[in-house]
Amino acid sequence: MYNFSKIIGNDIIKDILNNNLGHAYIIQGSDNESVNILCEHLILIYVCENDIKPCEKCLQCKRHLVQSHTDVKYIDPKISPKDMRAIISKVYLLPNETQNKVYIINNADTMNEDTQNVLLKIIEESPDYVKFLFTCEDNHKILQTIRSRCILLRMDNSDSDDNFPIDENIHKFCEQFFSSFITNDIVNLMKIINFKNRENFKESVKCLLIYMQKKLKNTDNNIKTIKKITNICNILNEININLEYNLNLNIWSAYLLNKCTESMEEA
Ligand SMILES: [Zn+2]
């Protein structure tokens, strides 16, 4: 159970984190302050030893709050690949004080490619107690190979989505998907969830997630609708991440349809 009382809005992010706390996140946002608040909050969640995390009262929380936690390590994004290798070589040493070791790279989108490449393997194969947090303004400036190993937390105040280019057919798909989903039109949804090829599927899921997140910001929605859209955003996010590893069109199309049906029945 996590306490997000300090995080304003960003319900999708809270849902993603509550659902399953992962080991590597990219926090993206145009407002540096809110990005840092979320990042620091996640560090506390990782180190806190109470059941409702973060408590900000336990020894571990307090240690981090005074910036003296030995298991919390900030890495300068400008360091050389050689220095990064030196840091990475110590990842396998067990945490000193708490159950996790947290590595933070702020402004990760300013890291050079060689340094990023050093990180690749360790993000994928790190021990369970190792956690990575990257903050950035633009996740596209981080290598795709790193992005695919992390969960992207896009903060609400980020406006980069507005410039996201959407193909006309995909836009039409998003509109139809949304209206069918909201009106519980399963028959039409079955017709729509029918993708030409893998690339089309990948692109459609990515755009649909952004489209649905925008719809979520519409304040006219009632609580039931918000819940329903949030639910499907989480599913789309999950599919989006998994598509990087396994691009079986049929499995994921069926999964999407199945989850949509479940959400409709719940609502
Ligand atoms: Zn605590």
Image (cartoon, rainbow, N blue to C red):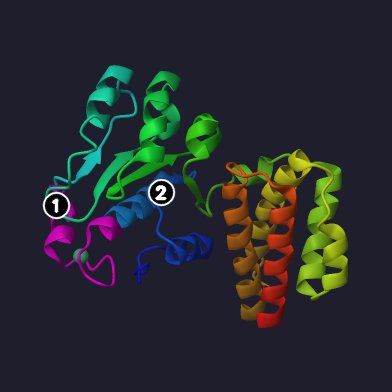
Disc 2, SS? helix
In this rendering, is residue 61 above or below 2? Answer: above
Q: Is residue 222 visible?
A: no
**Over which residues does the magenta segment extend?**
44-69
Q: Is residue 123 magenta?
A: no
Disc 1 crowd, CA 10 A, few/some/many (<14, 14-19, 20+): few
Q: Position of residue 45 (x, y in %)?
A: 29, 60
Write down the residue under mark 1.
66
Name the residue at 48% across, 48% down. 151
Disc 2 crowd, CA 10 A, few/some/many (<14, 14-19, 20+): many
Q: Quadrant of the C terminus?
A: bottom right
Name the residue at 28% across, 72% down. 52
Q: Is residue 61 magenta?
A: yes
**What's the amino acid at mark 1?**
Val
Q: Position of residue 111 (x, y in %)?
A: 40, 26
Write down the residue under mark 2.
35
Q: Is residue 78 visible?
A: yes
**What's the amino acid at mark 2?**
Val
Q: Is mark 2 within 8 Å of ligand 1?
A: no
Name the residue at 51% across, 38% down. 147
Which image quarter: residue 238? bottom right
On the picture, is 110 further left or further right than 201? left
On the picture, is 25 further left or further right than 168? left
Name the residue at 72% across, 43% down. 203
